[in-house]
Structures are given as structure tokens and as C-alpha cells.
Image (spheres, rainbow, N blue to C red):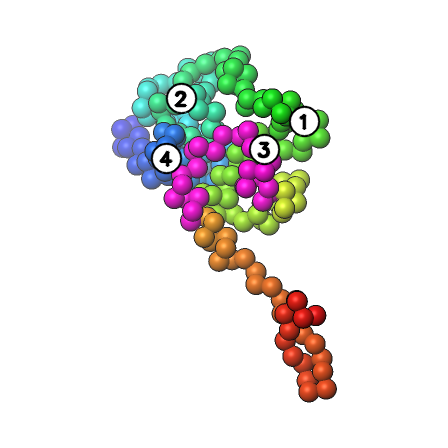
């Protein structure tokens, strides 16, 4: 059904942003709970990277996965996609390893106290920079505090997670919006005989 395919291709090409410094095509619609982009087709949510593979490389093998060479679930660049088995996918993840820094032998989800996964962190970064969700809203979706989300965004924690796919312009815009939306400090009020007066924190 060529007309239907053209419609899907048109919608597909409207929903990603190419990132020049890493080559990823970042999906801009809301991802699924695993961080993969999705597109509604016939009332069903279909993974966007699988659609990309079919559009650019042909029919899928139902017995194989569409894997990422870039380790970014939300990337739909066909040059970053290949067909493989589940074992191929796991071997590739180990080979490219979310590499373990020498100074911290248990980063990320390898740490027994971790409450997030690697894909959770990618999802947090994606939702903050590309969907405009603030740290407060994100802390309601994940088992971490607002300050914990901010530590991820600043690279203080989960620093081994690759962020090269975040477009610098998008990052700058997100920071600008965050600064604009930051709450102004509540003024301190002192009640005097002449009535209430506003003072700064240094004169309290």
C-alpha cells in the first residue's frame, strides 16, 4: 500500500532532530518506558527505530532485533541500526560497556545501591532537553529527588553515560528556560511599629 507507506514516512521524518556532533537522529515524540521512540500506526505504537530500518533498509527479520551501534534507544538514524540477535545486542553492550572508570569500579547500575538504570538516565536527559520536562516533574516519575535529577543533568552523577547526542543548541535553550523558570527567593518581611518592611537575608 504505497500511499500508506508515504504517509508513515512523512510523519517519521517530522519527528526527529539530527545531531551533527554524533550523527544520531533524536526522536522528539514521547518515548516508551524503555526509552525507545514510537510512532502510532493503525492505533498501535510501533518502535520508531524499527520503522526507520524498514524505510531505509528494507523488510525486517522477525527473528532478529534492530540494534543500535550508538547505544542510544531514542536514535533513529538508519546508519546506526543493524539486525542482530538478543545475544548480539548483549555482547555489543558489554563490548562498548558503559565503560567502567578506574576511580569508580561500580558506576551506574553496577552499583548495588543504584535505583536507576542506564536507560532511565538516558530517558531523564532526553525528557529534560528535548521534551522540556523540569527536574521537579522528573523527580515525580523516578525514585530520586529533584536534587538527584539535577546532579544527573550537571554530570555529577552517572557521568559515564554518553551525552554526545545532546545537541549543544538544545542544551543551551533548556538551561535558558530553566533559569527563566527558577523561582525568585521569597522576600523576608519584618513587622515594625511603622508597619511591615521588606529586608534582605543579610539584614535579618
Badge 3 density bin: few <14, some 14–19, many ≥20, Cα 10 Å: some
Please say if the residues under marks 3 and 4 sit with CB atoms less than 8 Å apart. no
Q: CA distance from mark 1 to mark 2?
A: 29 Å
Depth check, front residue: 16 or 11:
16
Q: Nearer the viewer, mark 1 or mark 2?
A: 1
Label 3, secondary structure: give it: loop
Q: Quadrant of residue 76?
A: top left
Considering only order in the chain, which callout, 4 or 3, is on the residue closer to the N terminus?
4
Q: Secondary structure at mark 4?
A: loop
Disc 2 target residue? 81
First in residue order: circle 4 vs circle 1: 4
Q: Residue 20 at x, y = what percent?
A: 34, 33
The mark lying in front, picked from 3 and 4, is 3
Which badge, 1 or 2, is on the more N-terminal residue? 2
Front position among marks 4 and 2: 4
Residue 157 is a magenta residue: yes
Say which residue label 1 marks.
111
The stretch in magenta equals 149-173
Picture coordinates of residue 55, whole percent (x, y): 32, 26
Q: Residue tagged by mark 4? A: 19
Position of residue 37 relative to residue 90, above or below, is below
Amino acid at each position: 500500500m504505497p500511499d500508506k507507506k508515504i504517509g508513515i514516512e512523512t510523519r517519521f521524518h517530522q519527528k526527529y532532530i539530527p545531531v551533527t556532533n554524533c550523527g544520531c537522529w533524536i526522536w522528539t515524540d514521547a518515548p516508551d518506558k524503555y526509552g525507545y521512540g514510537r510512532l502510532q500506526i493503525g492505533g498501535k505504537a510501533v518502535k520508531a527505530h524499527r520503522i526507520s530500518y524498514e524505510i531505509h533498509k528494507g523488510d525486517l527479520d522477525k527473528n532478529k532485533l534492530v540494534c543500535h551501534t550508538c547505544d542510544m534507544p531514542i536514535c533513529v538514524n538508519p546508519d546506526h541500526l543493524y539486525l542482530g540477535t538478543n545475544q548480539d545486542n548483549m555482547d555489543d553492550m558489554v563490548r562498548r560497556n558503559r565503560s567502567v572508570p578506574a576511580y569508580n569500579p561500580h558506576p551506574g547500575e553496577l552499583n548495588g545501591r543504584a535505583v536507576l538504570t542506564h536507560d532511565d538516565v538516558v530517558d531523564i536527559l532526553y525528557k529534560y532537553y528535548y521534551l522540556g520536562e523540569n527536574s521537579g516533574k522528573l523527580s515525580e516519575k523516578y525514585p530520586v529527588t529533584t536534587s538527584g535529577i539535577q546532579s544527573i543533568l550537571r554530570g555529577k552523577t552517572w557521568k559515564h553515560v554518553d551525552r554526545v547526542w545532546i545537541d549543544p543548541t538544545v542544551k543551551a535553550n533548556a538551561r535558558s528556560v530553566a533559569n527563566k523558570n527558577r523561582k525568585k527567593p521569597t522576600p523576608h518581611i519584618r513587622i515594625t511599629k511603622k508597619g511591615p518592611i521588606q529586608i534582605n537575608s543579610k539584614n535579618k
